[in-house]
Amino acid sequence: MPQGLRFACQRGCTVCCRQPGFVYLTEQDLERAAEFLHVTKREFERRYVYRTRNRLRLRVPRQSQCSFLTDEGCSIHEAKPTQCRVFPFWPELVESRREWRKAAGYCPGMDAGPLIKIETARNRAGEMRLAYPAMY
């Protein structure tokens, strides 16, 4: 296992936001984003969220991967969901060198920048496990 992982988010890059897949939300993510946008939690959910029995996720709009992705980046950056905030320190990426390398194929910030101690990376991955227990 490596002693650490190198990562530095690259200014202006939104490649991770453009990858196929879903952005899952916690109830706290939903509340934080609604507050940031100055709408009620109910209004935010009505406009942007798909809810199943045990999961919440952002709806995927027709024209882009995310309703909040603009040419300048994330329009709710200060309140973005845990999944987005923690990337690339997701458990599946931190725990597998192969998966880290696959993600590094599209993310220019991976394997760049300062060395993040492996314990720090695992702690960040733990945030994902806590936020989305049904996924892990």
Image (cartoon, rainbow, N blue to C red):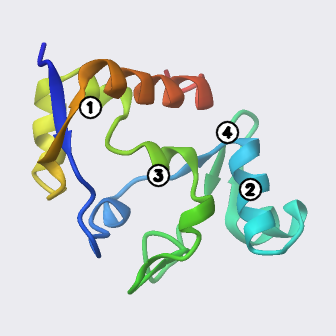
Q: Nearer the viewer, mark 4 or mark 1?
A: 1
Q: Look at mark 4 in the image and give the residue it sits on.
A: 55
Q: Secondary structure at mark 1?
A: helix
Nearer-N-terminus badge (3/2): 2
Viewer-closest of 4 and 125: 4
Q: Look at mark 1 in the image and give the residue it sits on.
A: 93
Nearer-N-terminus badge (3/1): 3
Nearer-N-terminus badge (4/1): 4
User: Three-letter amino acid code at disc 2?
Assistant: Arg
Q: Nearer the viewer, mark 2 or mark 4?
A: 2
Q: Residue at x 58, y 52 (%)?
A: 81
The alpha-carbon separation of the residues under discs 3 and 2 comes to 14 Å
The answer to whether 74 appears left or right of 13 in the picture is right
Q: Look at mark 3 in the image and give the residue it sits on.
A: 84
Q: Look at mark 2 in the image and give the residue it sits on.
A: 32
The alpha-carbon separation of the residues under discs 1 and 2 comes to 26 Å
The answer to whether 20 appears left or right of 2 in the picture is right
Q: Secondary structure at mark 3?
A: helix
User: Three-letter amino acid code at disc 3?
Assistant: Cys
